[in-house]
Amino acid sequence: MKSESEDTVRAWADIVIQRFESRIVKLNVVETSELLRSFTSQVILDSHGDPVKIVFTFLYYGIFPDMGVGKGVKYDQVSSSNRRPKPWYSRQFASEVAKLGRIMAEKYGARAQDAIRLIENRSSKEFNDEAWRNSSYNK
């Protein structure tokens, strides 16, 4: 059974790939569509079905234009060459990871707070089956 967090992470990974592809086209990074067709993502789950790792794969050469290297230009030569970085990956990826952090905090922060409240209230008269059923942690 898929968890809500797995669905969220898989949807996020699909959006990231779409944004990578859009940036590549916008910056005219490739002459063929091989790089665009090579994108995949994989969500690795723990034993409880919660996402612990997201792996993106694409053709190796795709990273070179992001750094401004390739076609005989090495990284330490970029500033003295005519080649300029076409930032389709590094900045975009950092931005998307930050977005995922905010999404997960918003969606699951309330759940974590409820879990803490339930633990804190376990010995009080307020903690009962009804409180558990009504908590966002149980949904």
Image (cartoon, rainbow, N blue to C red):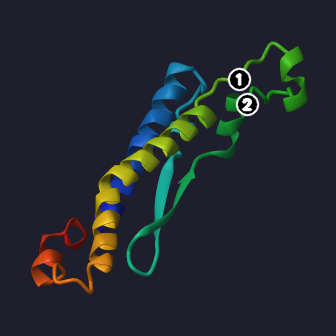
Residue type at tag 1 = Pro
Q: Are marks 2 and 1 in contact (CB under 8 Å)?
A: yes
Residue 79 picture location, percent across and down? 85, 18
- Which numbered disc flags the more N-terminal residue, 2 or 1? 2
Left or right: where 112 falls relative to 81: left
Residue 114: in sight, yes or no?
yes
Quadrant of residue 9 within the rendered picture = bottom left
Q: As rendered, which of 80 and 38 lies closer to the eye?
A: 80
**Crowd class of label 1 (few under 14; some 14 to 19; many from 20; radius 10 Å):** some
The residue that appears at 53% across and 46% down in the rendered structure is: 38
Three-letter amino acid code at the position of disc 2: Met
Q: Around disc 2, counting alpha carbons within 10 Å, would you say few (fewer than 14), some (14 to 19), or many (20 or more)?
A: some
Query: What residue sits 57% from the left and 52% below the top?
Result: 57
Between the C-alphas of marks 2 and 1, the distance is: 5 Å
For residue 118, side relative to residue 87 (left or right):
left
What residue does disc 2 label?
67
